[in-house]
Amino acid sequence: EVQLVESGGGLVQPGGSLRLSCVTSGFSFSGYSYDWVRQAPGKGLEWLSYINAGGTLIYYAPSVKGRFTISKDNAENSLYLQMNSLRDEDTATYYCARELGNDGEGYWFDSWGRGTLVTVSS
Amino acid sequence: QSVLTQPPSASGTPGQRVTISCSGSGSNIGGNTVNWYQQSPGTAPKLLIYSHNQRPSGVPDRFSGSKSGTSASLAISGLQSEDEATYFCAAWDDSLSIWVFGGGTKLTVL
């Protein structure tokens, strides 16, 4: 069974840092691309970042570019999101997702973790 | 303000057919495939439709998707109480080089 489990969320002060982890199981981690998506309380989904299977292609949403860093460790079957200079508006549940697809059919997020809550507050 | 536009709410009675629209532009829906995600309260999003109209294994054929130009639609036929959830559309935006989502449509089964 494909599983993605996020951790590392919690309460942090504005300006602080946090590192989220997403541990995967049930499939070959190294062969896939991944994304981070967040959802502020009572709000919609916001895509944050993408990393390809080789770790050579990375994209960020403008709202987090320069503050957040995505990375992956194939040996640990894990995806990470380093979050620096956190702001009140970063308060959200953060989800990791596996991305599938190809140039012909397009791409999609086929599996999601349950999320980890990050609260930025003084 | 979401890049893709969805109605905030929709409703129907059991057995009815409902549709949810998603409007974008040439740089996202117009040039790329559209995916739909279902999110029940307190749970993570779940892939419902990918590549405009493909259903992952396990998704009932009551759910269908379509795309025309820069808009897409999700149709749910034979509405059931367990379909009560929030539905999000998504597409890659070539101009922004980001994934964009709709604001979500909360479906109520009356």
Image (spheres, rainbow, N blue to C red):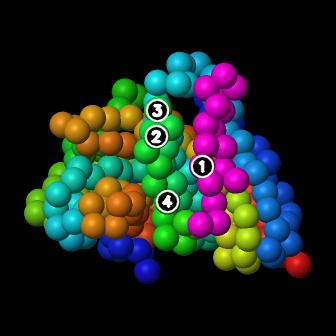
* Mark carried by residue A70: 1
Q: Position of residue B36 (x, y in %)?
A: 36, 51
- Residue wearing tag 4: A60
Q: CA distance from mark 4 to mark 2?
A: 13 Å
What is the span of residues highlighted in magenta in the rendered image? Answer: A66-82
User: Taken as a whole, is the magenta stretch helix, strand or loop?
Assistant: strand
Q: CA distance from mark 2 to mark 3?
A: 8 Å
**Could you confirm whether marks 4 and 1 are on the same chain?**
yes
Which of label 2 and label 3 is nearer to you? 2
- Residue wearing tag 2: A56
Q: Are marks 3 and 1 in contact (CB under 8 Å)?
A: no
For the question of whether residue B22 can be seen, the reply is no
- Residue wearing tag 3: A53
- The kind of residue on which mark 4 rests is Tyr
Q: CA distance from mark 2 to mark 1?
A: 11 Å
Which of label 2 and label 1 is nearer to you? 2
Of pointers 3 and 1, the one earlier in the residue sequence = 3
The reply to whether the magenta stretch includes residue A65 is no
